[in-house]
Image (cartoon, rainbow, N blue to C red):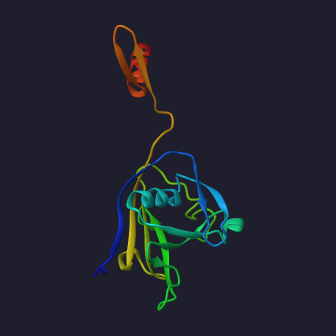
Amino acid sequence: HIRDQTVLFDDDVTLLPGTFDFTAYNSGTSYQINTTTPHGALDAASKIAGFTYNATDKKWSTLGTMLLDDVGDYRYNSSPDPDLVWAYAVNGVVKNDFSSAEGISSYQLQNNDRVEFFYGDKGDTLENATAVVRIRVHISSMDTWTLTLIGAQTTPISKQYFEEAVDCIHS
């Protein structure tokens, strides 16, 4: 039996390669975070859905990642249950956010990955979580462009169309 869950977000986000500014709530220090990480996906989702989140930098110097404490009203170590935490999974596999390779700010997502943040007792599964954030990630390439030819006609030509035409010439 799956527990009733509060779904804070369940939708797609498109991420562009790059970084965004994030300020750790515990220290007030600002960091550049890679957008194509679970942290970047959560940040994009928060802007779409209008929820807030807090992450701490207490593991930044040793692991290079933030640790997610709060999303909306679902808070780390909140009374009366001090064991409530946020965890996350990518494509159904729970990640160890106390790891430099799998932390929310360091794990590199791939196009079409499914990221799920879930809130519950330490060791709880996604199915037993109280609250969830489900994100389907689309990573957009920065090397897309459109060429517009202006003359007797104005014709936009996409990168894909241009490359297919060049391939035809060379075939």
Q: Taking 166 as reference, is 11 left or right?
A: left
Q: Is residue 106 above or below residue 117?
A: above
Locate residue 148: give its quadrant.
Answer: top left
Answer yes or no: is residue 95 visible.
no
Quarter of the N terminus within the rendering: bottom left
How many marks can you see?
0
Q: Taking 73 as reference, is 105 left or right?
A: right
Residue 13 spot, x, y in % from top left: 40, 53
Residue 146 spot, x, y in % from top left: 43, 26
Residue 162 spot, x, y in % from top left: 41, 21
Q: Is residue 171 above or below residue 68?
A: above
Determine the residue positioned at 66% across, 72% down. 58
Residue at the far top in the pictured view: 152
The answer to which of 42 and 89 lies nearer the viewer is 42
Answer yes or no: is residue 88 visible.
yes
Quarter of the C terminus within the rendering: top left
Q: Taking 150 as reference, is 19 left or right?
A: right
The answer to which of 171 and 142 lies nearer the viewer is 142
Locate residue 113: give its quadrant.
Answer: bottom left
Q: Taking 47 as reference, is 25 left or right?
A: right
Determine the residue positioned at 42% across, 59% down. 45
Determine the residue positioned at 56% across, 59% down. 107
Determine the residue positioned at 67% across, 66% down. 60
Residue at the far right in the pictured view: 61
Residue 88 spot, x, y in % from top left: 47, 69
Residue at the far left in the pictured view: 1
The answer to which of 27 and 157 lies nearer the viewer is 27
Locate residue 126: give its quadrant.
Answer: bottom left
